[in-house]
Amino acid sequence: MERQNGSDPEAPPLANLPTATPELETEVERLLGETEALLDREQGPRSKLRSLPSGSRSIVAAAGAVLAVICVYAFARRSDFSEIPAWQLALVTASYAAPLAGLVWCLLSPLYRVEVRPERARRLILGSFALPFVWAVLPPLAFGHTGSGTTRHGCVFLGLTLGGLFIGLLRALDRAADGDPRSVAMGAAAGGLVANLGVALYCPETRLLHLALVHAPLGLLLLFVYRRVARRLA
């Protein structure tokens, strides 16, 4: 008897695939039409950014985060920056960069890749929001802790500006719907990490109350604002 899967006698027979029904074909055509209409509406620089390969878009996002931190270092760094141990600076930067890279990868990964499992995505989001609080309550490792304890005004404004600009960059690079709750949470968490790292380079305050109530909640504030904006855009 002739086998369906070739001349190999040991290979298992191929499974019979279901035939396409008119309803399935109609649904596929509808989805393709919506996708084409979405792509047709995109014009200008934003469309060019979104048409880049995922790797290139991730590099653009990483460059945006680095540029934000460099601007704070160049124009508004804290007065005691030279007193911060190099190992501490490297440790804090790496601890923020690792989850930030994971968030950017999840947001900008191509559609044909398998999505991150919901529980893993949830842990990544919660961990990113919690990380600044961890740095605020760990005296031996809290960023700096060598400064004079003088508070610089404008921490919240600077943090929201840096985080908001980074969220805007991610939105310009991502085709996901503005109202997608997971994308909104990931974007806010990523913006919060950039904001906290930038503010840590800006403010020499060492008091737990200031770090925990002003610096650390920046990501949550961004989430609150981003949700309201996303609802209007949706």
Image: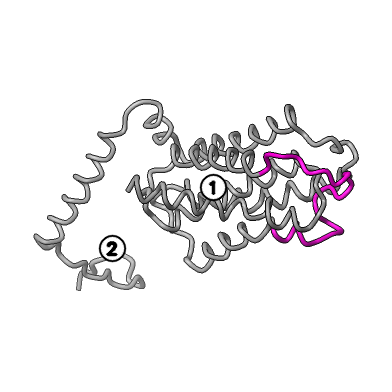
Give the main secondary structure of the magenta stretch: loop
Magenta region: 133-155
Q: Earlier in the sequence, mark 1 or mark 2?
A: 2
Question: Does 47 sit left or right of 147 as displayed?
Answer: left
Q: What residue is pinned by disc 2?
A: 6
Front residue (pair 31, 126): 126
- Looking at the rendered structure, the secondary structure element under dot 1 is helix
Distance, label 1 to label 2, CA atoms, is 44 Å
Query: Residue at coordinates 45% horizontally, 58% vertically from top-left?
Result: 182
Amino acid at pointer 1: Val
Q: Establish if 47 lies above or below 231.
A: above
Q: Residue at x 58, y 63 (%)?
A: 126
For mark 1, what is the residue?
Answer: 104
Between circles 1 and 2, the one closer to the viewer is 1
- Label 2 crowd bin: few (<14), some (14–19), many (20+), radius 10 Å: few
Q: Secondary structure at mark 2?
A: loop
Image position of 199 (left or right of 7)? right
Which residue occupies 87% across, 44% down?
147
| Residue that sits furthest to the left in the current view | 22
The image quadrant that residue 49 belongs to is top left
Magenta-drawn stretch contains 76: no
Image x and y of residue 67, in percent:
64, 32
* Label disc, if present, on residue 65 of the rendered structure: none
| x then y, percent, for residue 195 | 63, 44
Kind of residue indicated by mark 2 = Gly
Q: Determine whether, in the image, residue 151 is placed left or right of residue 160.
A: right
Q: Are marks 1 and 2 in contact (CB under 8 Å)?
A: no
- Characterize the local packing of mark 1: few (<14), some (14-19) or many (20 or more) Cα atoms within 10 angstroms: many
Residue 22, position in %: x, y? 9, 60
